[in-house]
Image: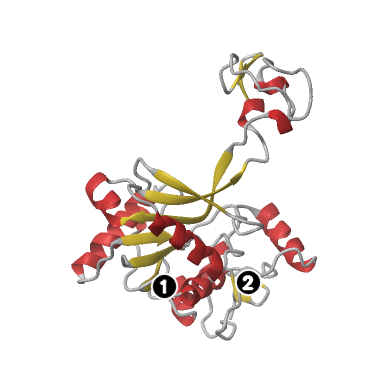
Amino acid sequence: MPSVVALIPARYGSKRVPGKNVRVLQGHPVLAYTIAPALESGVFGSVIVSTDSEEIAAVARHYGAEVPFLRPAAFAGDTSPDIEWLEYALAELRRRGRSWDCFSLLRPTSPFRTSDTIRRAWARFTAQEGVDSLRAVEKCAQHPGKMWIVRGDRMVPLLPFGLASPKPQGGEGGEGQPWHSTPYQALPPVYVQNASLEMAWTRVVVERRTIAGDVLVPFLTEGYEGFDINDAYDWMIAERLLADGLATLPPVPQVPYGAVRVNHVSQPGSGILNG
């Protein structure tokens, strides 16, 4: 079985949800709900958090992850591509005598991902031959066939106008209509990637300087496994899902974190850790 490392990106800066990687959700910082299932899955040789913040590093270590070094500020900006910090992390680990055949990116903003999610993804990835990577996807709620580009006072379909829909399932007519004028149910299914999980061979980064490579296998997330917290509205939805019992968080065995004050991300009434 190939060796694999979990890499969890948790930089300090976040404009839309300040301090979101350590913001408290049901008693624990959201980061804990990625570390705990990664450890519990039994898939990874190491679970490593990549952060530019010593305070976030302290939270990560409390919940059982490794933080062998801090990420340089040059790779922690709002527009820094993943390939930069990932390339740096793998190179720095190799320099310390640690290397893996594969890596998995697990983002803290997907708190409903479980250890079973990870095990299912790993089994699917390792069962494939000739692939570069695996990426979590889910069915699109908004079909790209109904999306437009606005140029001045004119609308242009995002997809070519000539793409015609098939005949609606169980119905008559509709064949040959452009996608933007076709019922959603009659359109071919389209999937969008979510941020919950990626897996790839390390060679893809080292040899080709890319995360995904050319041959990707899809991993269909179930329920709220792929739910991603990007902004304050997403955070409210996550809290509502939990309050209504529609989603559950993975168990976190460690006691709630409160020994170290996370000064530079704490805000009164924000729900962010403040010791």
Residue 46 drawn above or below residue 86: below
Q: Amino acid at mark 2?
A: Val
Residue closest to the eye, 61 or 245:
245
Residues at circles 1 and 2 in contact by the CB criterion of under 8 Å:
no
Residue drawn where x is 52% and y is 72% of the image:
37
The residue pinned by badge 1 equals: 54
**Residue 11 lies in what quarter of the image?**
bottom left
**Residue 240 lies in what quarter of the image?**
bottom right
Residue closest to the eye, 176 or 107:
176
Name the colouring of the figure.
secondary structure
The residue pinned by badge 2 equals: 24
Q: Amino acid at mark 1?
A: Glu
Q: Secondary structure at mark 2?
A: strand
Residue drawn where x is 63% and y is 71% of the image:
24
What label sits on residue 112 in the rendered view? none
Asked if one can make out residue 218 in the rendered structure from this viewpoint, the answer is yes
Where residue 111 appears, x then y in whole percent? 59, 64
How far apart marks 1 and 2 lie (CA) works out to 18 Å
Residue closest to the eye, 18 or 105:
105
Asked if one can make out residue 19 in the rendered structure from this viewpoint, the answer is no
Where residue 154 appears, x then y in whole percent? 65, 13
Looking at the image, tell me whether mark 1 or mark 2 is earlier in sequence order. 2
